[in-house]
Image: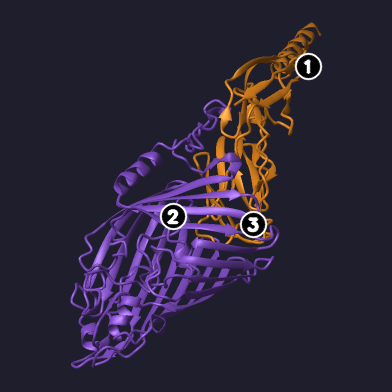
Amino acid sequence: MMRAGAALLVVGLLGAPSADAQPPSPSASASPGANRDTSDGVRLPSEPLAFAGGHVTIGADVSASFGGSDAGFFNYTDYDHSALRTFRIDVSGAVNAGAHLALLAEIRTENVGEVVPYALYVRFRPWADRNFDIQAGRVPPTFGAFARRTYASDNPLIGYPLAYQYLTALRPDAMAATADEQLSKQSLGWLLRYSVGSSSIDHGVPLVSAFRWDTGVQAHTGSRNGLVNATASVTTGTLSNPLFHDDNSGQQLAGRVEVRPVAGLIVGTSAARGPFVSDALARVATDGEGRAEDFTQTAWGADLEYSRGYYLVRLESIVSAWRLPAVSAPFMDLPLHAVSTSVEGRYKLTPALYAAARLDHLGFSDLVGTQTTAPWDAPVTRLEIGGGYSIQRNLVMKVSVQRNTRDGGRLKRRATLGAAQLVYWF
Amino acid sequence: MHGRGVLALACLTCLACLTSLTWPVDAARNGSIRGRVDLRRAAPPVERRPGVSELGAAAARDVTDRFRSVVYLETAPRGAFETTEGGRAVMDQHNETFVPHVLAITTGTTVDFPNSDKFYHNVFSLSKAAKFDLGRYAAGRSRPVRFDRPGIVRVFCEIHSHMNAFILVFSHPFFAMTDSDGHYRIENVPPGAYNVVAWNEGTSSEPKPVVVPDGGIAELDFTLR
């Protein structure tokens, strides 16, 4: 049923009426031998579809990525797909019911599979002339910078920053009993089973999930001059494991402050803390004595963006700490830490062509096992270089090459992966 | 003396012939075309994308003027192309809107794109008539583009996808923008028969024939959409 829905979505998009269907007047170039400009006469929508006098708007992002086989599972996401081999359709909509109230939603399907409600929330602005909004439902991520620009049209490359995509060897519903067991799971985040908690085989979690949004209430405000913006939220899940239905009794608190001291410069800092471990795992791991609220994910982030002329540079660093139950000796040194650092740049070479690169590292704290001391998951470094060419304003062809290196684990430790992506949006 | 007289007469005759080739003895007086473009339905404004990933509502922006049309001669009188002189025009960026939304210019005109907002804009076009990208620049700055090829140039902002504008580049001067009521007047048109077209937001009329009388005014109305 859901697959049929996804197929209908594809058909609907391809057959959508064009807001720019009428080719521009070819004879505006009213001279003998003049150039007849038809470059903008493409019949695909180039602008959001608008209904009811602009009160209802619908947009879409469609991307098709074709990449090499990722035997090392460097690019797998918590949708169980490689980010380099994904056909994704995002359809978003907004219903603006006056100056105070709006309903926003987004549905997504990957590889023409299940249609997932990625976002669904109400935005309430109590005072029409004040920059203060309350959003409730499945809301955009408060934490970090990249999580709100995961759309292919916003990402200059094809891969994602490791912090937001790479699956670590941690699960909210299952865990290792000992440090030795945890060390044996290095690099297996794409699919792993633990001895405590759920016995199913499942994937681990990234530091911050870019592919699922959390559910809760969010408040946002900003100064009139745009210098400072601040956001706070209370949500059901955690950064690693955003949820619709709570699996423990606690809530995550997250906050973000963003400063724009000069045009082109954005400096942000974020923090979040919430119960990570599910109630079921907490009970099993502590013989019923521990509470899920004690086993948290705490994260801090700092990000910076600067752009001017034809270049754009972004930096983002995230530190995350997970506090898990201590089950058996040799015990894990808790909390488990992970640190990610990402530097990204883009330069426009011509109006239609740009080059981009991202250097990314994800490191993990050490665990002392019986035989060895090593990071609790294998550190990963990724360099991705690529670029994009705008066939038209909202149709972009990207190509990139990734060099992935993993320092440890049982899986393939190095992989050079090429990929191409076609992105269309309106 | 007689011989000199014949020579002088021959010279005068030649001079008179040459002069008549360049400037007609009885020069035709230019006329004009005027009328009204009736828009049955204004083109809808380009809305913002739904902005689901935004942490709050976007600030209000100016409404674009979509009622102004451009009326132009489909073919220009002989010699019109030698008379175009590129001037200077301005397309401002104010409150996330290009002002004016439609600009009609002749080839050789340089358009300045000042940024009157507090934040960055990035003006660009991928149109065949003019491909350019002015990069990101802050408030108070302006960057120019010279338009040398006739055609329609769609202008966008890379940062604010709802910002868009049209620049119609003509290789002759026989065009006019309508006022907010749809009235137009194309001045200084040499007498003769022409085809005239009206354009609004990517929609153009069928060419309409008109005869401009010597020193007179031709009336021509259009209905679009």
* Residue occupying image coordinates x 63% and y 69%: A262
Chain in orange, by letter, is B
- Where does residue B29 sit, x and y in percent of width and height? 77, 18
For residue A146, above or below residue B156: below
**SS label for mark 3:** loop
**Mark nearer the N terminus (1 vs 3):** 3
Please tell me which residue lies in front, B16 or A114: A114
**Callout 3: chain:** B
Residues behind callouts 3 and 2 on a single chain: no
Give the labeled residue for mark 3.
B59
Tell me the quarter of the picture where residue A379 sits. bottom left
Residue that sits furthest to the right in the current view: B1
Q: Chain of mark 2?
A: A
* Camera-side mark, 3 or 2: 3
Determine which residue is flagged by label 1: B215
Please tell me whether mark 1 or mark 3 is closer to you in this view. Answer: 3
Q: Where residue B173 appears, x then y in whole percent?
A: 67, 30
Q: CA distance from mark 2 to mark 1?
A: 56 Å
Amino acid on which disc 3 is placed: Ala
Chain in purple on the image: A
Circle 2: residue type: Ser
**Can residue B149 be seen by looking at this rendering?**
no
Q: Quadrant of residue B103?
A: top right
Which percent across, then down, holds residue A312? 50, 64
User: Is label 1 in a helix, a strand or a loop?
Assistant: loop
Quarter location, residue A278: bottom left
Q: Residue at x 50, y 73 (%)?
A: A303
